[in-house]
Amino acid sequence: MPKLPEKYENPLQPLLDEAIGEGIEKGPAIRDILTDVMHLCDKYGVHFQKVLEGASEVYKEEKGLYFGVSAMAGDTYKTPKVKSTRKKV
């Protein structure tokens, strides 16, 4: 999978910009966005932790860091390769 283009625009950026404009710091604003994603997972019966693990793998692929081994919490088990569903820009 190719890396994302330098000019990739994250669809969540407007939410983050709005929160920052309201005086919320970046870290708590991103936490709130993740909390909203957790609520969506609950609403649709999706296991958030599995989604997060898959997202971590896709992120590593996009950043060119995928080595087929989980880097989370020092784990060394092999993780399944996950294809990104992102549209190419």
Image (cartoon, helix red, strand yellow):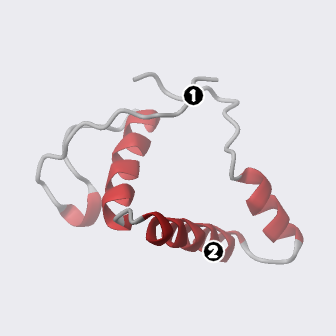
Residue 45 placement: quadrant: bottom left
Residue 87: numbered disc: 1
Residue 1 placement: quadrant: top left
Asked if 3 appears above or below 72 in the picture, the reply is above
Which residue is the site of mark 2? 32
Q: Residue at x 16, y 60 (%)?
A: 75
Q: Residue at x 73, y 52 (%)?
A: 13
Looking at the image, do the residues carrying marks 2 and 1 touch, with CB atoms under 8 Å apart? Answer: no
Sooner in the amino-acid sequence: mark 2 or mark 1: 2
Closer-to-camera residue (41/31): 41
The image position of residue 88, as x and y in percent, is: 58, 23
Amino acid, disc 2? Asp
Q: CA distance from mark 2 to mark 1?
A: 25 Å
The image position of residue 31, as x and y in percent, is: 58, 73
**Image label count:** 2
Amino acid, disc 1? Lys
Where disc 1 sits, the SS reads loop
Q: Residues within 10 Å of mark 1 (few under 14, many from 20)?
A: few
Q: Quadrant of the C terminus?
A: top right
Q: Residue at x 28, y 60 (%)?
A: 72
Residue 80 placement: quadrant: top left
